[in-house]
Amino acid sequence: MQQTPFCLRVVHLLPYSMSDANKTDFTNPSTFILLGIPGLEMAHVWISIPFCTMYAIAILGNFTILSIVKTEPSIHVPMYYFLCMLAVSDQVLSTSILPNTLSIFWFNSREIDFSACLTQMYFIHCFLTMESGILVAMALDRYVAICKPLRHSTILRNPVVAKIGLSVLLHSCMLALPTPFLARLWPYCRTNIIPHTPCEHIAVVKLACADIRVNSYYGLFVVFFVTGLDVLFIVVSYTQILRAIFSLPTKDARLKTFGTCSSHLCAILAFYISSLFSSLTHRYGHYVALHFHILMANMYLLVPPVLNPIIYGVRTKQIWDRLLCLFTHKGT
């Protein structure tokens, strides 16, 4: 595979020259070099400010959601159990990315152990897939609550919710498992320099001196088959939900019922629109600047963990009331 011309322009960023790295014959190198956002090295400190702010919002917001659901017995229902799963997934996803990214921006700590790189790759793909699966589970909850309201408590009992959560977890872990194993198979004899902030799957395997079509095919399988099925299930669920809503007799009843889905719809849009935009940027990346492509890839990983607690905190009455109650007590 032809070496990317960009690598020739980053020699001055490294403690050793690119030519020395290229002369080294190695398979499965002990470390990779993460460049951060190539072309914007001088602005890394400034870029770290919104990144750090987003990470703080994600951690604080999702922790608040978990704390409120834990301490408020009135919301111990399937919708909020799934919301807690989403919050945990967001916590792990953002924590698997941001600390390493900020260490690059702040301390120029670019080296990452090969095994740590593969572990980060696994966590990224695992928890992105898990987030999609949890959104499907939440769509199921909304479908049952609106289309079969009298049977909601019998259909989605706590053991059923636990089984759904466990199946989403196992499904995500198994689907993400081939990604690091496939990446470990190839010899990396060209360079160990990754023009990215996290160890993203394709960014890593593009450095391999081998035919990586199996990696590309598996990535496409996950995107189009697995994520596509998730989207299809959500669309079918909301088609039935909208039919049930429009059959209600009054406008107020329709608006009130639709309001119970608004937070979930916003979370779906935040996740899948950012995913689609990142995929298009990756697919047509040769038409855009490299730093823009990498910034968009980071936004795809960071936007859902930041927006989800804000969406549910603002648009879910029980959580909003609990937050107001907490702040009111603190103020008095």
Image (cartoon, rainbow, N blue to C red):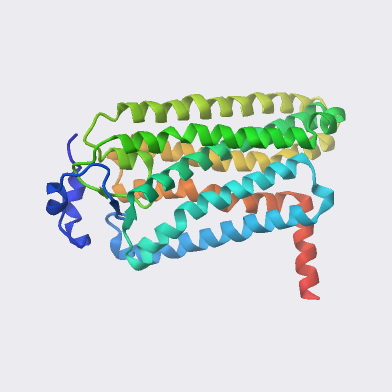
280 sits left or right of 247 in the view: left
Give the quadrant of residue 145.
top right
Q: In which quarter of the image is the N terminus?
A: top left
Residue 155 visible? The answer is yes
Q: Is residue 48 above or below residue 183?
A: below
x, y percent for residue 131? 57, 40
Q: Quadrant of the C terminus?
A: bottom right
Q: Is residue 224 above or below residue 112?
A: above
186 sits left or right of 315 in the view: left
x, y percent for residue 68? 74, 56
Give the residue at the far bottom of this rendering: 332
x, y percent for residue 38? 28, 54
Which of the pair 79/180 is nearer the observer? 180
Give the quadrant of residue 135.
top right
Which of the pair 124/324 is nearer the observer? 124
Q: Residue at x 45, y 53 (%)?
A: 97
Q: Residue at x 78, y 26 (%)?
A: 244
Q: Residue at x 63, y 45 (%)?
A: 86
x, y percent for residue 74? 84, 49
Q: Which residue is drawn at 61% across and 49% down?
A: 88
